[in-house]
Image (cartoon, grey):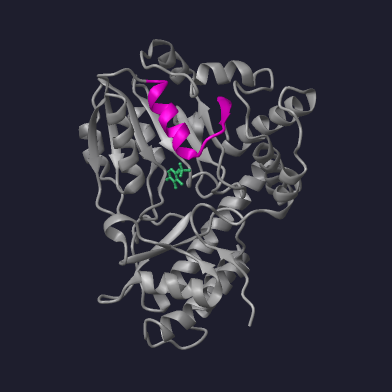
Amino acid sequence: MIRKTRLFTPGPTPLLPAAQFAMAAADIHHRTPEFRALFLKVLAQLKIFIGTQNDVLLLSSSGTGAMEASVSNFTSPGDKVLVLSAGKFGERWVGLAKAFGLEADVVTAPNGETFDLEVVKKALKPEHKAIYMQASETSTAASHDVEAIARLVKNTDTLLIVDGITGLGTQTFDVDGWGVDILIGGSQKAVMIPPGLAYLSVSEKAWAAAETSKNPRYYFDLRKERKNASKGESAYTPAVALIAGLGAALDYIANQAGGDLEKGRIALIDNAQVNAAATRAGLVALGFTLFAPKSPSAAATAVAVPEGMNSGDLVKALKTRFALVTANGQGEMQGKIFRVAHLGFFDYLDTVAFLGAVEHIAKDTLGLPVEYGQAVAAAQKVYAAAYKK
Ligand SMILES: *Cc1c(COP(=O)(O)O)cnc(C)c1O
């Protein structure tokens, strides 16, 4: 039988064909009216996609570039910050804080869990320049309550800086209402295009902090990007093809709701949430244990394989037999869990296909007592209930 490659990783995610065509056609120069029109259109779309009146900037880098810019532009060496870390991406904030000479207080939560709000409340001090967190911790597939943290920070001088790289397109944010100062996204996640672009919204409160920051900045000088963006340009040569692809992807998301991008964004979030719930039900029906049962992310699902088994065997077998690519656990979670994505260009039938493949591998590779259709049946019920609503 033939095999068809299917990406089920939480970044990169499957590519939207319309975006691929737009990328292939994008041989335009970046200092021309054609590009300026495209860039301004995409920035305006991103504002709606993020859901904010704040400035939105686009950087030619992977998501971590925008994370670094969110440290280097708004802090100075020696500043105290609070980092909320519950996995590999939380640790990235800790590493960045260290690299820029910040004094980071760190609130942690065990892998697969989210933060105890009382602990965060106690840890947060008026001298904290910023609080750094993830909306969705992709390494454990747990989601964090950005709204609750925002309530603690509102009306203080502390900036709220959120890595929403897998949160955007999978959970709802009221950026301006809650007071999220920085919200970061990445191209290879919910927006269905390849890696290479990061985008972020920046509040007025954050811009004021940028004026007093004493860090050196050059490529990631957000003030320079803001100035250029207002003219439809970027400071340096941007990833033109990716920007064309992003425009096409945001058009597609809008067209899922009759051309209304705000409604399309909600449809995309609902889609991820229903697929995540159906996947959880299917995998639990097969005997796997949810890794983040209390606050599961809709971006990805992480499940633990039964004691004594290796999740790597399942990841490998799915790839070998079905060309279906999932993600093993990272760091100390490697071999214990595997992760499957729902963000971006996945539909419910992808979920059915995934669960159908897992039924075979769970039976043949892991030796679990599988009845064919068991996982799919559990997912079907979740889908049916969501469809009726
Ligand atoms: C993918 C991801 C990133 C960005 O990683 P890059 O490899 O730099 O694009 C950051 N945070 C989270 C939560 C992610 O899922």
Tell me which segment is drawn in magenta. Answer: 53-74
Q: Is residue 65 magenta?
A: yes
Percent across and percent down for residue 363 are: 42, 85
Identify the image quadrant of residue 78. Answer: top left
Q: Image point 42% across, 78% down: which residue?
A: 285
Percent across and percent down for residue 217 are: 44, 18
Identify the image quadrant of residue 361. Answer: bottom left
- Would residue 257 be visible to someone looking at this image? no
In the picture, which quadrant includes the N terminus?
Answer: bottom right
Q: Is residue 296 left or right of residue 107?
A: right
Residue found at the far top of this picture: 212
Percent across and percent down for residue 382 are: 52, 70
Q: Is residue 192 left or right of residue 324?
A: right
Residue situated in front as seen by the camera: 17 or 127: 17
In the picture, which quadrant includes the C terminus?
Answer: bottom right
Question: In what quadrant does ligand 1 lie?
Answer: top left
